[in-house]
Amino acid sequence: MRTTVLALAALGCSAVSPNRADAQVSILGTGCDGFSVSVSGQPRIGSSMQIGYQLAPHHQRSFTILAMGAVDPQPLDLGTIGATGCWLYVHRVFFATIPAYPSVSLDWNVTVNFANNPGDVGISAVIQFASIQLVNPLPVVTSDYIALTIMP
């Protein structure tokens, strides 16, 4: 398993949306063709958590895109353009390309570090992955998504 350090603040203002709702971390939505996300830990200021994805065994190693932003109230059904069963849940998106060289089990993890800044408490974001795969006419599969709100 490969681990990389990533500072959430470095992703830029478009990656998060202010929201003073209750702090939480959840996995929501549906991934397509066996593509799923994972999370370990809590989004707390001054700490870190692990996020990652798992591709199904029949997938190829490929470039993967991490998308961050606000949750889309009306997710885009990518099946209408050739990615059957796939959804885009992220709205106002920031994309980062991950050159994925996953282990044999086709998984990948990253450590997300949260600054010890009380002003970050209540900031919310959603994180979703997409991977180029040749299983659909539109050669992409998407994961479910992680919704988080930074806690004290």
Image (tube, rainbow, N blue to C red):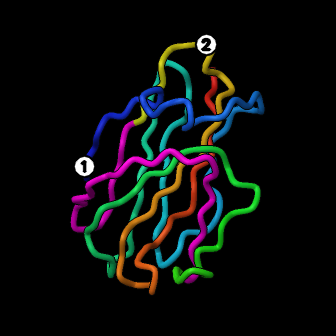
Badge 1 element: loop
Which span of residues is magenta-colored?
Answer: 84-111
Q: Quadrant of residue 5?
A: top left
Q: Residues within 10 Å of mark 1 (few under 14, many from 20)?
A: few
Give the residue drawn at x 65%, y 45%: 70
x and y percentages locating residue 65 in the rendered image: 40, 56
Given residues 104 and 133, the one toward you in this image is 133
Q: Position of residue 10 (x, y in %)?
A: 42, 28
Residue wearing tag 1: 2
Distance of mark 2 from mark 1, alpha carbons?
30 Å
Left/right placement of residue 91 relative to residue 142 reads right
Secondary structure found at label 2: helix
Q: What residue did someone put label 2 on?
A: 118
Q: Which is nearer the N-term, disc 2 or disc 1?
A: 1
Q: Residue at x 25, y 69 (%)?
A: 61
Q: Quadrant of residue 59?
A: bottom left
Residue 95 painted magenta: yes
Residue 74 vs 56, above or below: the answer is above
Q: Is residue 110 magenta?
A: yes
Q: Measured along the vertical axis of the image, is residue 32 above or below residue 114?
A: below
Q: Residue at x 45, y 34 (%)?
A: 11
**Residue 136 sits in quarter:** bottom left
